Amino acid sequence: MLALARHAPGRPRRPAAVASYVRNVADAALAAGLRRLVFNTGNRLPEAVTGVAAFETRRAAAAALLGSGVPTVVLRPPIYLDNLCAPRVAGPLVHDGVLRYPLPARSPVAWLSHDDLAAATVAALTRDALAGAVLDIGGPDEVTGPELAAAFTAELGHRVDYAAQDPAEFEAGLAHAFGGPIAADVASTYRWVAGAAEPLYGVDRRAVEETLGIRLTPLRTWIAARPWRLLAGTAR
């Protein structure tokens, strides 16, 4: 059994090329007699084709694996809670009381922790009758930006307000850590979400827990367990 995650590429690739690369993985898995493969797309995928490479390469990879003959489960997460632990987010949150993230304030998100992602991946690898499934996963609390900030206010003991960050500003900051091509690739998904008419990052909590046999971590429980002052450091 094997779990794969789709990481941001060094530069956007064509979906057809990505599907070709994935078929090489599938051929090797078939030759090795792999009993199941779990593929984490690393992002939720819009139902319709978008023209955004960061979405469409993931869509092509998932389709190639599902059609390969290898028993495959596809996990499609929303945004990770652990993204909020980055100093560029945690710093302003702790020092200035501002939760800054490149999502519209109105967008509901079932933020998922890495711990819950790990539990979902193990379940997808080991539970019966899941081969061929495509599962939208997420955390148990679906919140807008202001609702997320309110959860931080309740747990940290000081007021936190939400500020929708400009994706261009987010991209510039990300480029310092990961380089321009990766930053542009990631920022393109946030630009798409900002202009989308329908929410992308919701989830049916009960369906996730019942299908995978796991218990998801409540948002405030996750917040309370993190060392926010340490994560914030001196970043503002």
Image: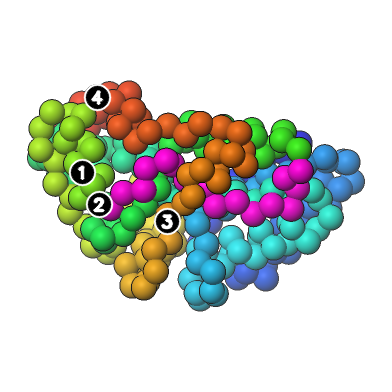
**In this picture, which residue range is highlighted in magenta?**
129-145
Residue 144 part of the magenta-drawn span: yes
Question: Which percent across, then down, holds residue 62?
Answer: 66, 58
- Whether pointer 2 and pointer 1 mark residues with C-beta atoms closer than 8 Å, the reply is yes
Q: Is residue 172 above or below residue 234?
A: below
Q: Is residue 41 left or right of residue 124?
A: left
- Whether pointer 4 and pointer 2 mark residues with C-beta atoms closer than 8 Å, the reply is no
Q: Which residue is mark 2?
A: 145
The label nearer to you, 3 versus 4, is 3
Q: Amino acid at mark 4?
A: Leu
Residue 136 part of the magenta-drawn span: yes
Q: Which residue is mark 4?
A: 230
Asked whether the viewer can see residue 66, the reply is yes
Question: What is the secondary structure assignment of the residue under circle 2?
Answer: helix
Q: Amino acid at mark 1?
A: Ala
The label nearer to you, 4 versus 2, is 2
| Label located before the other in sequence (1 or 4) | 1
The label nearer to you, 1 versus 4, is 1
Q: Quarter of the image holding residue 200?
A: bottom left
Question: Which percent across, then down, holds residue 25?
Answer: 76, 51
| Label located before the other in sequence (3 or 4) | 3
How far is mark 4 from mark 2, CA to CA? 23 Å
* Residue in front for this viewpoint, 117 or 87: 117
| Label located before the other in sequence (3 or 2) | 2
User: Which mark identifies residue 149?
Assistant: 1
| Label located before the other in sequence (4 or 2) | 2
How far is mark 2 from mark 1, CA to CA? 6 Å
Q: Is residue 146 above or below residue 234?
A: below
How far is mark 1 from mark 4, CA to CA? 19 Å
Asked whether the viewer can see residue 172, the reply is no
How far is mark 1 from mark 3, CA to CA? 17 Å
